[in-house]
Image (spheres, rainbow, N blue to C red):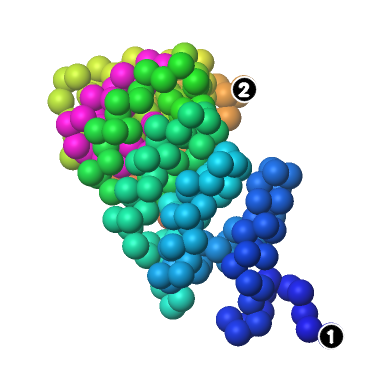
Amino acid sequence: MPSTSLETSPSDLPSIDHLIEAAVAEMRRDDDRTPALVVLQGMGTPEGLARMLDLSRSAEPMRRRLAAVVLGQMHGPGQRSDERAFPEPACDALLRLLDDEDTSVMVDAAFALGHLGNRRCDPALAARRHHEDPHVRYAIAFALCGSTTPVAVEALLALMDDPYDQVRDWATTGIGQCTGVDGPVIRAALLRRVDDEDVFTQVEAMHGLARRGDARVLPPLIRALGHEHLMPHLFVDAAFTYLGLEEDADIDEAELMVRLKARLA
């Protein structure tokens, strides 16, 4: 009896129709285990692209969502999973889905554009930074993370003040990690977030200042490392970065505190 497993040789793979139905079922269950979806993402062939583009125009939102998720991470046979097949047609379809009437489709399209990382999409993404749905704004912050285009930086700076924790976290990550973007406005925005009510946003803000060698990070960083209830281990990387230490340096948190306090003198 032939195997029904999705982990088979290419000649034994289920048909693309079967995979689509299985992947739709996975998404309906909101299941972390998505073998059918993973296989579809690896079908970066002309046929696979054509089917996903067709699916992106489905009358059913869940199928349009599936198309977005696949197009954002589609890679061809023999390609690594972080490589992208047909990125330009995928971007065109995803930009259209970014205007979808269904908010969930918009969210998946924005996340997919983030995976593609095509900076020509930045203006369309940035234009939705004030969307009323926080999940859309979260997806926009994710999608713009890593971009240094002026329109993306302006949007991320605005999203750093968002009322939704995950939006601030990703926007702060986007600004903090891009050391090629710097200046008084950037540093002031990071400094505002070092006392954020969300600990992960705090971490990203301090790491962003540490990457830029800004001494104003020292007092909040020392407080965070000494705070028993604030998961101080999360801030160790920022301390290492500020001090210029290698990641594998054999230094405990007590020694880090000594070195950081010495920089305050």
For marks 2 and 1, give the CA distance: 57 Å
Q: For the residue carrying disc 2, how many other residues have a C-alpha within 10 Å: few (<14), some (14-19), or many (20+)?
A: few
Judge whether residue 159 is colored magenta: yes
Q: Residue at x 50, y 40 (%)?
A: 108
What residue is disc 1 on? Answer: 1
| Magenta stretch, residue numbers | 139-162
Bin the neighbour count of mark 1 within 10 Å (Cα to Cα): few under 14, some 14-19, many 20 and up.
few
Earlier-in-chain disc, 2 versus 1? 1
**15 lies above or below 102:** below
Tell me what residue is drawn at x 28 percent, y 48 percent.
Answer: 118
The residue carrying mark 2 is: 229
- The amino acid at mark 1 is Met
Of the two numbered discs 2 and 1 in the rendering, the one whose residue sits closer to the viewer: 1
Q: Amino acid at mark 2?
A: His
Spot occupied by residue 228 in the image (x, y as percentages of width and height): 60, 24
Question: From the viewer's perspective, is 247 left or right of 186?
Answer: right
